[in-house]
Image: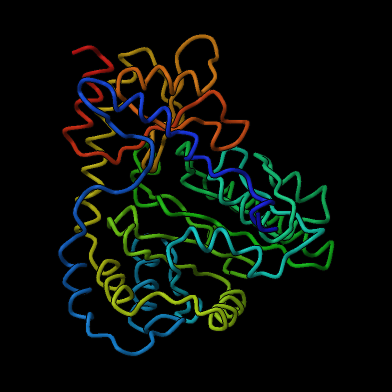
Amino acid sequence: MGLLTAALPDFPWDSLVPVRERARAHPGGLVDLSVGTPVDPTPEVVREALAAAADSPGYPTTHGTPALREAVVAWFARRRGVPGLDPDAVLPTVGSKELVAFLPSLLGLGAGDAVLHPATAYPTYDVGARLAGTVPVPTDDPVRLLASRDDVRLVWLNSPGNPDGSVLGVQELAAVVDAARAAAGRTGRPVVVASDECYAELAWDEPWASSGVPSVLDPRVTGGDLTGLLSVYSLSKQSNLAGYRAAFVAGDPALVAGLLETRKHAGMIVPGPVQAAMTAALQDDAHVAEQRERYRRRRSVLRRGFEAAGYVVDRSHAGLYLWVRPDGPPQDAWSTVADLASLGLLVAPGAFYGSAAAGHVRVALTAPDERIAEAAARLTGA
């Protein structure tokens, strides 16, 4: 076993294999609601752009084409309330997971440094900290820890949150940014705030559905200063581009320049045709609205089914998941996973997302309409 592998936890999804087989044995077959992988077609406007750029014999640019970076800037202004972003402060990435996993290393963090991340969280924040040799610290109160610890060098935020669909408002984001800057001033060491915002276009509850999910780059958060701030975004969810590995990071020009330099050396480059496809996707809001409506319908059907069956849906204000627990006395998530597997429904246990999540399961909306309807029918006995 390699040294890096020895430092990592077991890959959580492997533990679902026996439960998957039990669910698959249901007479009506498996309804897989465990992984948030898109199942709907990639929009034609995106496929056409990919095909048009298919004759791509030369190396692509690591920084991304000017057209792509301008499209990101325009998208931030149009959809996220972030005007005037510098195109040089935009960098395409090979999906967002690789950036999450390697950001602590790319920032030069190591032994003696701490990385804060949400207590209920996508496990790659923890993995990335371990890969860099830093200390991962799960917390729901980063402001307090920033004030009390001198070793924090990176704070991960995730809004909307995976798995629980929680959303951070402008004041909450600003409080973390202010605390990180205060910590940097106190210790003389930079503190980066990186916000994973990949589900921002999928808001369901108010006020987010009307006003939008705020970004860490929002001027109301930053006070007009992007120093130390990064926003991470993926097109996998809003544009059904998971197979393209299409994402980007934007924010502090100095931080992005450093990431760019390292990625040039490492050859971490988004393929040229994918960059063209990303440009087309970011310039077209119609397909995003269409996909959002699909997920809205599926969410409504699944939520009614779970609530009719005696489950409670907590938070889930935005994103691709329902955060579900049985009504009544607390129950370990693996027991809930087993209960649902007896109906042929496969979901993810909250244990995958930290000890704070052990009583919930995550239910993905990413299944075809027919299977979503089947899941609801099994839950209600209809």
| Figure check: 301 above or below 226 | above
Question: Where is residue 253, by image quadrant?
Answer: bottom right
- Please provide percent x and percent y for residue 125: 59, 51
Quarter that holds the C terminus: top left
Q: Please name whichever residue, 197 or 178, is drawn nearer the observer in this view of the structure.
A: 197
Q: How many marks?
A: 0
147 left or right of 209? right
Q: Please name whichever residue, 171 or 156, is drawn nearer the observer in this view of the structure.
A: 156
Task: Give the residue at x 69% y 61%.
Answer: 132
Task: Give the residue at x 30% y 23%.
Answer: 344
What colouring style does the render use? rainbow
List the single residue furthest toward the top: 328
Quarter that holds the N terminus: bottom right
List the single residue furthest toward the bottom: 58
- Please provide percent x and percent y for residue 332: 54, 19
Task: Give the residue at x 33% y 45%.
Answer: 210
Question: Where is residue 300, by image quadrant?
Answer: top left
| Figure check: 342 above or below 96 | above
- Please provide percent x and percent y for residue 272: 33, 80
List the single residue furthest toward the front: 1
| Figure check: 147 above or below 355 | below
Task: Give the residue at x 52% y 46%.
Answer: 169
| Figure check: 165 above or below 70 | above
244 left or right of 17? left
- Please provide percent x and percent y for residue 187: 84, 63
153 left or right of 263? right
Q: Please name whichever residue, 177 or 327, is drawn nearer the observer in this view of the structure.
A: 327
